[in-house]
Image: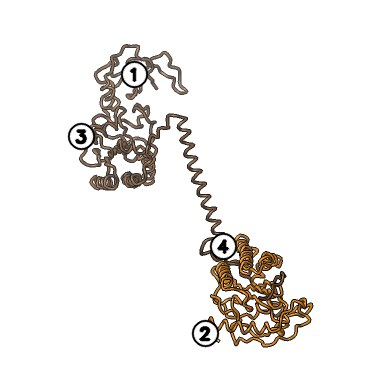
Amino acid sequence: MGVSSCPHCGYSLQVACGLYGSEAVVAERLMDVDGTLVPEQRQAILDSLDDFGRLFPQLFFLVYLGALPPPASPRQFAFWLLNHAAVTDLDGLQPNERGLLLVVDPRGGTAVLAGGYFLESLMGQEELDLVLKSAAKDFSRADYPAALRIITAALGGLLKRVAREALWTPRRWPSGLPETVPAGFPPLVRTGEVSLPESMPEASPLEPERPPEEMVPSSAAGRLGRRTRSAVRRANPGRR
Amino acid sequence: MLLASAGRLVALPEEGGHDLTGELEEAVEFLPDNPIPWHDSLLGLPGWMRQELTEIRDRIRPANQGGGLFPPQIWPLQPEPVQGPLILDSSLPGEGDSGLALDPRAVVPLGPGLMGRYTMQQPVGVLVDPQQLIQDRSGGQMESLVQRWLNDQCVFRTTLLVFGPGQQLPSDFDPQALRRQWAGETDDSLLVFYFYEQPERTLAIFGHGACATYTAAVLRSIVDASVVEAARVSGPTEQLERFCYKMSVRLHWLARSPPAKLVDTGVSGNPSRRWWGNMAVSVAILGALGLAAGFGVVRLIRSRRPRSEGGHDGPFLLPETEPCPRFGAPHSGGFSAVITFPRQSAP
């Protein structure tokens, strides 16, 4: 059993839920909440996500591009979104612990790459830092499709090595490799009514602070929800 | 005991008796199988004709028939020889024995008369037993077995000649000539000389075809194994029957197996070419082993490669682990990396 909160500072998901809400959030693989991307860039990013999904069918990749809802800490927002996102345009049902989330705030000049428990079991913090740093130049040039290609390529290299090591050194991975791609997981975060909070509470003093100048307007959270809902309605007219 | 030596009769001292050297005594025993060689005789005895010698050896003619230097009081007339097969002791003389055995119970060569009954004319059937040695079952039954086993069920045309125990083929008899006489140049002919109650003395004469196809060791092993199998049973007819059966089985498998041909590879006579031939064979074997090892290594690497449907670009399966949630978060525990970059201006 895991711990429900940090034994030192008492931080937990409930703190983030107090900021952004405790309901599941309908999300897509690519959430361009500010409309930053042109269609070609959007398609290029979706192609990169498709390629990554084909290579590693046990994982799925989400991209959030846009201003963060206030009072937003990019890391805390990624932590909250990965635990609450209900991704609608995945080929198969995947629990969110198999997800990766890239949150890019162009205005704030921040990028966060977060992973679920499954990715955390496969690589360390330093590796994840290196993966994200490898795309720093492309983030600076606002070439987000190229940044995503580099990130997926670097992640792919690491994960392929992990897959090979699991074959050659089975003792390191006692559970071994699955015979087939796991499928049929219960839709953990897709049950129930999906709703988004209209207003964000104040940030908890226990959460990691970010500089005040990097704060984004408080209306971003509402825009995220509305834009996501409208995008889902456009893609799936029969679904609320 | 008297021994003939250089035409003079020398009396040897009896064991524990008195010395009789220089004293010519009355002959007490005559060995018809060891007559005095006339050319060694210093007495100028009349020579023996070869036919007479043969008849004496066969005990057909008394040794002193036709008179001699010694009267019957000195050299008594020998009894009439025994006609027919001699039931002798099972101890056999060495191979190539001319039949002049000192032990009268040893193997005795067949006389021309008896041998003629075997070889005078080509037999109609496959079993030649003019002495009617096969007792336990009728000759017809045994002949049908020989016909079925050694002729119908194998590729050889076999003729089986049954001789009595203790009988020996004459030294001047050429079995290969007899085979040629009966079978001509037929390659699949097989002549078997079987000695009743003594299967270990069996002699098999193969035709040119078998001798050209198989090595002598292979053919000899077949006969030897059949003889051993025959010796496992006790009855003489059962021995013959088992011999025929076992030999038919071995000949059958011999015909079905790839022949160990006595192929002249052309390198047998030249040591240098033979060395190169051996080297080529060694290189070929090593090459085959290397290929097999390489193939095995490739298979091992492929089996160890992450399973994928499309080669290198296929899906990679990652090891499953049990998640350990923390911070009350069901899916992600905040595992993340953060970088900052120059802010982009709003569009």
The CA distance from mark 2 to mark 4 is: 40 Å
| Number of the label disc, if any, that sits on residue B36 | 1
Give the SS element for disc 2.
loop
- Of the 4 image quadrants, the one containing the C terminus of chain A is bottom right
Query: Three-letter amino acid code at disc 3?
Result: Gln
Q: Who's the residue at 61% across and 64% down the image?
A: A153
Q: What sort of colour scheme is used for the picture?
A: by chain
Q: Are marks 1 and 4 in contact (CB under 8 Å)?
A: no
Give the SS element for disc 1.
loop
Residue B117 visible from this viewpoint: yes
| Chain shaded brown | B
Chain letter of the residue beneath label 1 in the structure image: B
- State whether discs 3 and 4 lie on one chain: yes
Name the residue that disc number 2 marks.
A237
The CA distance from mark 1 to mark 4 is: 97 Å
Q: Are marks 2 and 4 in contact (CB under 8 Å)?
A: no
Which residue is at the front of the view, B164 or B248? Answer: B248
Residue B125's place in the image compared with A146, above or below, is above
Query: Three-letter amino acid code at disc 4?
Result: Pro
Coordinates of residue A195 in the picture (x, y in percent)? 62, 87
